[in-house]
Amino acid sequence: MIAATHIEPLGIYSRKVKSLADVPAGATVALPNNATNLSRALNLLQADGLISLRAGL
């Protein structure tokens, strides 16, 4: 059986940084404390070029 799945949007929010291009090297970010949203957050950060993840993990 295949069913449609709704995926909630995930965003990046900051009071100080207005653009992802302005995030300084070595910046600290908060991540969700659950496996599903943690992996989504890590993939989002990688897609925006802020981090790189090792393949196969």
Image: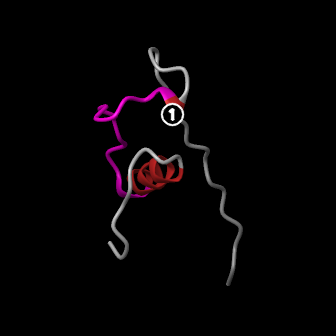
Residue projecting furthest to the bottom = 1
Query: From the image, which quarter does the C terminus lie in?
Result: bottom left
Residue neighbourhood size for the residue with mark 1, other residues' Cα within 10 Å, grouped as few (<14), some (14–19), many (≥20): few
The percent position of residue 49, horizontal first and vertical second, equals 48, 48
Q: Residue at x 61, y 47 (%)?
A: 8
Figure check: 57 above or below 9: below
**Residue 43 percent coordinates (x, y):** 47, 55
Identify residue type, mark 1. Ile
> From the viewer's perspective, is residue 50 above or below residue 17?
below
- Image location (x, y in percent) of residue 16: 44, 15
Please state if 44 lies on the left or on the right of 2 as rendered.
left
Q: Say what secondary structure mark 1 lies in.
A: loop
Residues rendered magenta in the picture = 22-36
Task: Indicate left or right for 16 with 53 as reference.
Answer: right
Give how far across and how far down residue 5 sits, in percent.
66, 63
Quadrant of the image containing the N terminus: bottom right
The residue lying furthest to the top in this view is 16
**27 sits left or right of 49 in the view:** left
At horizontal 36% and vertical 61% (from top left) the residue drawn is 53
For mark 1, what is the residue?
12
Q: Is residue 44 magenta?
A: no
* Residue at the image position 62 percent from the left and 54 percent from the top: 7
| Above-or-below relation of 29 to 17 | below
Q: Magenta segment, principal secondary structure?
A: loop
Q: Of 3 and 50, which appears nearest the observer?
A: 50
